[in-house]
Amino acid sequence: MKAKISEVLRLIRYRSGLTQKAFAKTLGVSPVSIHSYESEKRSPRMAFYEKLIEKFPGHENEILSTVNDQVDKEASNMEHKQTVDILMENNNLLKDKITYLE
């Protein structure tokens, strides 16, 4: 099973001996953001991942793996939304046809 970004962030932070506050300062984000990422309340943006790779070399594989998972998840959500939109549109068209035929 692949690691989640929350796990990767904690691993990098612990190995670096940094608090959430110091880690956040190094990455140019707020401590609240780091807490949100580590507790899986929010997902980082791509710029965050770039900064993470830049500031903490040696963890590229773990970071990129989580980025790929996030991109796949977002793509799947978009595909699902598009499918729902198409079904709703078809449903509305059918309703219009039924109304027309009545």
Image (spheres, rainbow, N blue to C red):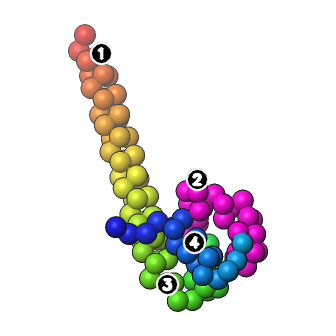
Residue 91 belongs to the span the image colors magenta: no
Check disc 3 and give the amino acid type. Answer: Glu
Residue that badge 4 annotates: 9
Q: Give the range drawn in magenta.
A: 20-47
Q: Position of residue 96 (x, y in %)?
A: 32, 22
Q: Give the image location of residue 11, x and y in percent.
A: 55, 75
Q: Which of marks 4 and 2 is nearer the N terminus?
A: 4
**Front-most of residues 49 and 22:** 22
Residue at image mark 1 = 99
Task: Bin the neighbour count of mark 3 within 10 Å (Cα to Cα): few under 14, some 14-19, many 20 and up.
Answer: some
Q: Distance between the residues labelled 1 and 3?
A: 58 Å
Q: Nearer the viewer, mark 2 or mark 1?
A: 2
Q: What element carries label 4?
A: helix
At 63% from the left edge and 76% from the top edge, which residue is drawn?
Answer: 13
- What secondary structure predominates along the stretch shown in magenta? helix
Q: Which quadrant of the figure contains the C terminus?
A: top left
Label for residue 60? 3
The amino acid beneath tag 4 is Leu
State how far apart marks 4 and 2 are (Cα): 14 Å
Residue 36 visible within the image: yes
Residue 20 image offset from top left, x and y in percent: 70, 69
